Amino acid sequence: MKIFLILVFLCPLALAAQTKTKTVQKTNTVAAQPSGFTIEGKVTGYADGTPVSLLNGQTGTSEAETTIQQGAFVLKGRVEAPDFKIIIFNRQQPYLTLFLDNSNVKITADKETLPNASITGSPAHNDFETLNAQLAPYQHLFAQDAAYDSAAVVAVQSLTTSFVKSKPSSPIAALAAIRYSQVADNPAEAEPLYNMLAPAVKSSGMGNYLGQTIAEARRNAIGTVMPDFVQNDTEGKPVKLSSLRGKYVLVDFWASWCRPCRQENPNLVANYNKYKHKNFTVLGVSLDKAKQAWIDAIKMDGLEWVQVSDLQGWGNAVAQQFQVQSIPQNFLIDPDGKILAKNLRGPALERMLEKLLK
């Protein structure tokens, strides 16, 4: 498929399977055009009566429904702000993704080559396709297990910067800036692009996300020394972060009740075992309240490194100190205590450790 999005803006089809849950109130405030949208489609390969659904690209909820008649369909409605949408036929993959504004949109498609459908008439979608076409040669950078490619990173940063400078009022300019932040070692480097965005784009869903990402990057910024802290281990003995100076340390915030944390633990264990003899360790900071559940999870998951907690749940003093508002979350610090990276999970952690400790 020629379109590639970050998950926060486009749920996988598995999450978009015609669920009828209540839609979360949007924060997008990009000025909507005065009239609604009309989507006129001409498709081949589908029988008359085949259902066609327009889904919210974030929640998967249906926003308009119709059926194909004589190879055509029409969907009408209104969006409060330009946003990602999915058009799905017969509630099955493959599907179309478009960035919809209140325009007259025309779609020409064939069932066998659906991802190559022609979508015209929407200025926002035109910008979306333009950006995707420019970034297509570098799509590998956005894969979860992407290898570092310095030349490709420079190219993506140059392309996205040019896009934002030329189209600061386009809703897609926010996506371009997000793409820049994704390939940067430090997402805060995208702040100059964020500052170029028109006010309405800054306050859109993607603009808000980018602003929050930059603000998070500014807190406990990469390159700064991680402030010291002390908390008790499972035996009640105080442990200072500074006692681990001289090693690369992954400070890992987690909890026994956190399913994504537990799913990530095998990756942490594998990397710990691979690099523990190369000046690397992990310091776990648990947001548990029940001590036995915490200890049981440590044993069950085989977490051999030092673990600390004050058993105050989300009120954990260290989590409060570093403004940890979601878990799993981690900080990789160097032997001098400087923050090298944040939120390294899956293959990203192994790639970073391999680069540092090979």
Image: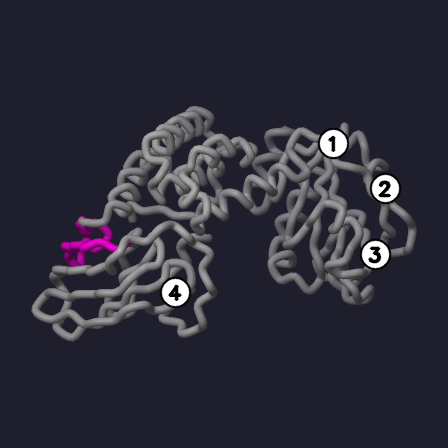
Range of magenta residues: 101-120
Q: Secondary structure at mark 3?
A: loop
The magenta stretch spans residue 117: yes
> Does residue 141 appear anywhere in the picture?
no
Q: Is residue 245 magenta?
A: no
* Badge 3 vs badge 2, beta-carbon distance below 8 Å: no
Cα distance in 3D space between marks 2 and 1: 15 Å
> Which residue in the structure is indicated by mark 4?
60
Amino acid type indicated by mark 3 = Asp
Of callouts 4 and 1, which one flags the residue occurring earlier in the amino acid sequence? 4
Residue beneath disc 1: 225
39 to 217, vertically: above or below: below
Image height of 181 relative to 93, above or below: above
Tell me the kind of residue under disc 1. Val
* Residue assigned mark 3: 310
Q: Does residue 259 show up? A: yes
Tell me how far mark 4 sits from mark 1, CA to CA.
42 Å
Residue shown at 49% from the left, 30% from the top: 192
User: Which is more toward the observer, 334 or 313?
Assistant: 313
Q: Please provide percent x and percent y for residue 319.
A: 74, 50
Circle nearer the N terminus (3, 2) = 2
Residue at coordinates 39% horizontally, 48% vertically from top-left?
Answer: 5
SS state under label 2: strand
